Image (cartoon, helix red, strand yellow):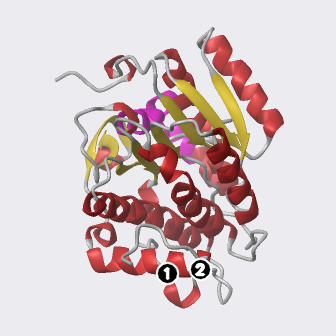
Amino acid sequence: MKHWDNNSIKSQSGKRFLITGANSGIGLEAAKVLASKGAEVILAVRNLQKGKQAQDEIARFAPGTKTSLVQLDLSNLESVNQCVEQLLQQGKTIDVLINNAGVMQFDRREESAQGYELMWATNHLGHFAFTAGVMPLLEQAEQPRIVYLSSMVAKFKAADIYYQDLNFEKKYDKMAAYAQSKLANIMVAAELNQRLKQSGSKVIALAAHPGYTATNLQQHMGVSGMIMNALFAQKIPMGTLPTLMAATDDRLTGGEYIGPAQMKNWRGYPGKNTLPKAAEDAQQRQRLWQTTEDILGLSFLSPA
């Protein structure tokens, strides 16, 4: 059977992709490949200087392609709102939103500008608010989709939504905090897809994960992370394939979870993976959705 790889991606000419965290790792690799397939790519980045360096790298990889930058710090809800306002004023259709940006496993508990635990704020709250904000631009597209980048840790024992201490103020556990944020990503993707269907929207939502891939996120794992990278990790181009498949494969209809298909989803070419149990449970998804709306003070595809 033929494996799904970059050669499986048809021309993306005429499509506009917005990728959060597109200046490094999987986000940058996805931007390079999509640009090489003819897509226009908007790089949403915290640091515009690093974003410009990413643009230059994309231009070297795929000369003549079109990219642009917007500043977005997902940990800061003011930055999220400013970026949304800028994009809405520009009014450019978004065909595919890839919610890729993420932070991982700080040794000490850190807080966002609004006082939320930083992984929860960046990986979950920021993406939820950003997606809600740019939804009108997605609705303008012919076949729009939203891809959330989750992680293998969403199925780890530590993965739960810790409602009794969402911000880990009582006891900080870096793995549990990270696992919570990545489980939330896939739960939101699954619930968003259901709500979009129910509302009659043409937008679909799905999730992807890279398996165990050597990215700059492992910098917080110390020596153990370096050893794991050396022994088990996939290279970034391979780890990016699930994201690219989720973003471009026309056979996908929404609600899927795409990740490596070998070694218990740690490595290999991409295919459909099973959802974590919490993401399959409508009551758990809806509780998280309502909790998130309450925290952010917004209503996103909620019943009137």
| Rendered image: mark on residue 133 | none
User: Which residue: 57% across, 23% down?
Assistant: 32
Asked whether 43 falls inside the magenta stretch, the response is no
Q: Amino acid at mark 1?
A: Thr
User: Which residue: 37% across, 61% down?
Assistant: 192
The residue pinned by badge 1 equals 291
Secondary element under disc 1, as helix, strand or loop, is helix
Asked whether 245 falls inside the magenta stretch, the response is yes
Secondary element under disc 2, as helix, strand or loop, is helix
State the image coordinates of residue 185 (x, y, percent, origin top left). 46, 61
Q: Is residue 212 visible?
A: no
User: Which residue: 27% across, 74% down?
Assistant: 281
State the image coordinates of residue 173 (x, y, percent, origin top left). 61, 76
Q: Is residue 148 visible?
A: yes
What residue span does the magenta drawing correspond to? 228-246
Residue 98 higher or lower than 35, as above or below: below
Q: Quadrant of the C terminus?
A: bottom left
| Rendered image: mark on residue 295 | 2
Q: Along the line of sight, which residue is nearer the eye, 40 or 249?
A: 40
Query: How many residues crowd mark 1 within 10 Å: few (<14), some (14–19), many (20+)?
Result: few
Q: What is the C-alpha distance between the residues marked 1 and 2?
A: 6 Å
Q: Quadrant of the N terminus?
A: top left
Verify CB contact (< 8 Å) between mark 1 and mark 2.
yes
Q: Amino acid at mark 2?
A: Ile
Q: Quadrant of residue 119?
A: bottom right
* Magenta highlight: main SS: helix
Q: Quadrant of residue 64?
A: top right
Relative to 205, 60 lies left or right: right
State the image coordinates of residue 151 (x, y, percent, origin top left). 46, 54
Residue 126 higher or lower than 202, as above or below: below
